[in-house]
Amino acid sequence: MVILSDDFRLDDPDDTSEYLTVQYFKSSAVNPCINTSYAFVERVIQVLKDYHQEAGQPLTLIHLGGDEVPKAWIESPICQSLLNATNRENLHDMIYSVKLRSEQWSCLLL
């Protein structure tokens, strides 16, 4: 299977947001407004689950973080479009919906 880089794009190339993570990285946060971010995370979870299953130690919990990048994505045109399309007022509301979506991943661990 050939995977193209855009299949798992994690950022908006037009995002001009400036932020610093608690680990002192710039531009390293996965953009939750891009569907390919979810495809990437789902793939990583599936691979990790498979590795753990093969080792006889099922993967039952995974922490995805995302709570330490408060200024990320505020200048992302993709996020702004999504905010407008979903009638959300701010990125905090958007992140809440991302948390709800991430709860769907728990079924991958079962």
Image: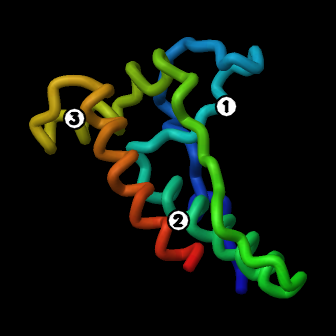
Comparing 4 with 30, the one in front is 30
Residue kind at label 2, given as amino acid type: Ala
Task: Return the residue at label 3.
Answer: 83
Task: Return the residue at label 1.
Answer: 28
Label 3 to label 2, Cα distance in Å?
20 Å
Comparing 87 with 5, the one in front is 87
Residue kind at label 3, given as amino acid type: Leu
Image spot of residue 46 (x, y percent):
65, 75
Residue kind at label 1, given as amino acid type: Ser
Task: Return the residue at label 2.
Answer: 39
Residue 20: quarter of image: top right
**Residue at the image position 71 percent from the left and 71 percent from the top:** 59
Image spot of residue 86 (x, y percent):
14, 43
Using residue 8 as the reference point, say whether residue 105 is left or right of it.
left
Image spot of residue 107 (x, y percent):
47, 75
In terms of sequence position, does the residue under pointer 3 or pointer 1 come before the other? 1
Task: Relative to 87, say whether 56 is above or below.
Answer: below
Comparing 3 with 104, the one in front is 104
The quarter of the rendered structure image containing the C terminus is: bottom right
* Helix, strand or loop at mark 2: helix
* Helix, strand or loop at mark 3: helix
The quarter of the rendered structure image containing the N terminus is: bottom right
**Residue at the image position 59 percent from the left and 60 percent from the top:** 41
Comparing 66 with 34, the one in front is 66
In terms of sequence position, does the residue under pointer 3 or pointer 2 come before the other? 2
Task: Relative to 18, say whether 51 is above or below.
Answer: below
* Helix, strand or loop at mark 1: loop
Image spot of residue 84 (x, y percent):
15, 35
